[in-house]
Amino acid sequence: MILVSAVRGDPWRTKTKVLMIGALSLGILLIYFLGEHIFLSRIRRTIPLQICVTGTRGKSSVTRLIAASLREAGYKTLAKTTGSKPVLIFPDGGEKEIRRRGAASILEQKKIIRLASKLGAQALVMELMSIQRECLSVESGKILKPDILAITNVRLDHLDLMGTTRKEIANALASAIVPRSTVFVLEEESNPEFSEQAAKVGARVVPVAKSAPGNDLIRTAGLPFEEFEENLRLALAVSDFVAVGREVALQGMFKAKPDFGNIGLWRVSSGPPTRSHFLVNTFAANDPESTFKAISRIKKRIPWAEKKTIGLLNLREDRGDRTLQWLKAFKNMADKEFDELVFAGYYPHALGLKRRLGDLAGIKVLACSETDPERLMKRLIPEEARETVVFGLGNMGGLGRALVEHWEKIGNPYGH
């Protein structure tokens, strides 16, 4: 019996060893996480002011505007956006695109906190990366723990991850509210879910009214790039709270660089005879509601009459929910927003949409497999074409980014 046990091994002894190794590994892991928590808490305390921005649309813009106002007021400020391009904005206003080796992870936010502490930053302004409720709760509540949280808006997007109703999406965004923080929300975007979460954790919600004193300055700000009044109003409310004067804040915002995904408008010429065409970047607006708001704004800015209008929808394979949103929006379009719809990017979806839509009340619907920006533009606007306005819709990723980079090369920015 003893011989058999020696040959085959004692199962009780083996089980004990496995349990001991498991307990030791768990202990080491707990010690590591405790050490990380203590270290992160210590370096966070070296940064006097920490501000985070979340919401459906406009996060990158609001992050940039807040950081610019703080820089102008003399705060040594590090900022990070994660929108169309993940970018670090340094205390001198210089920028560096973040190059990732793999998929984006909220753990990279720890590196930014360390960098802010190393630079001796007095303020850290961060766009939150997360979409899912659980990740957003960890990112804001465990890693960043902001003093101030700005929530831009609640729109129907990322339906597969955040929920299919505004209430569900507001609940997801509310998970970013942390104890003892001050939360700024536009008056028209206030949701009971924000107040309920704030009351639960001991935070304070500050609604940002349209008619607040000093808002007349917003209308005369004259920023050298396209910006929504709502984003300016929210950023200025945060600046007010940290005692940055309106005029100083606006001076800083005037110097800010717009986000790569910000509404862009370029004018290009073709001919002879010379014809003027407009290229409009609304790719990063993503959802139909935000996009049509942007288009309404642009329509007031450019000579519109007699021009052919093309909606260029860039599709992504991993954004099927967004594709369905656009399909529904086009079917329900009350006004003839475009003369022509062109589906590009993820070509199988493009073909499917064309078959499902056919022609919409006189709007020509096309599917295009071209992925080279230069060749695609020649198809959209041939030399003999009448003056045209092309709106980039749907997704900044992939073809959208390539097109915007191409438009920046071939076009002249159209005046503010």
Image (cartoon, rainbow, N blue to C red):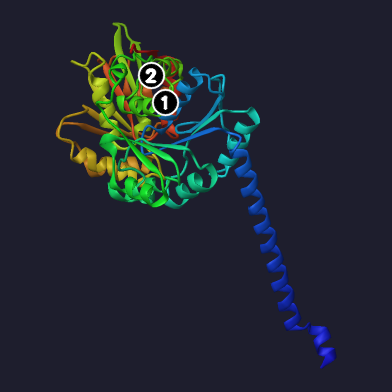
Screen quadrant of the C terminus: top left
User: Marks 1 and 2, Cα distance to the nearest angstrom?
Assistant: 8 Å
Name the foreground residue: 268 vs 299. Answer: 299
The picture places residue 259, in percent across and down from the top left corner, at 44, 25
Q: Are marks 1 and 2 in contact (CB under 8 Å)?
A: yes
Screen quadrant of the N terminus: bottom right
- Give the amino acid type for the residue marked by disc 1 in the picture: Ser
Name the foreground residue: 304 vs 56. Answer: 56
Q: Residue at x 56, y 32 (%)?
A: 98
Q: Secondary structure at mark 2?
A: helix
Q: Is residue 91 above or below residue 397?
A: above
- Give the amino acid type for the residue marked by disc 2 in the picture: Arg
Q: Is residue 396 above or below residue 224?
A: below
Name the foreground residue: 86 vs 120. Answer: 120
Q: Residue at x 25, y 35 (%)?
A: 188
Tell me which corner region of the image, top left, top right, bottom left or bottom right, holds residue 88. top right
Q: Residue at x 52, y 42 (%)?
A: 144
Asked whether residue 111 is in view, the answer is: no
The picture places residue 154, in percent across and down from the top left corner, at 31, 41
First of labels 1, 2 by sequence position:
1
Q: Mark 1 highlights which residue?
A: 239
The picture places residue 321, in percent across and down from the top left corner, at 34, 47
Tell me which corner region of the image, top left, top right, bottom left or bottom right, holds residue 151. top left
The disc placed on residue 246 is: 2
Question: Is 63 left, or right, of 415 in this rendering?
Answer: right
Asked whether residue 97 is in view, the answer is: yes
Question: Is 251 left, or right, of 210 in this rendering?
Answer: right
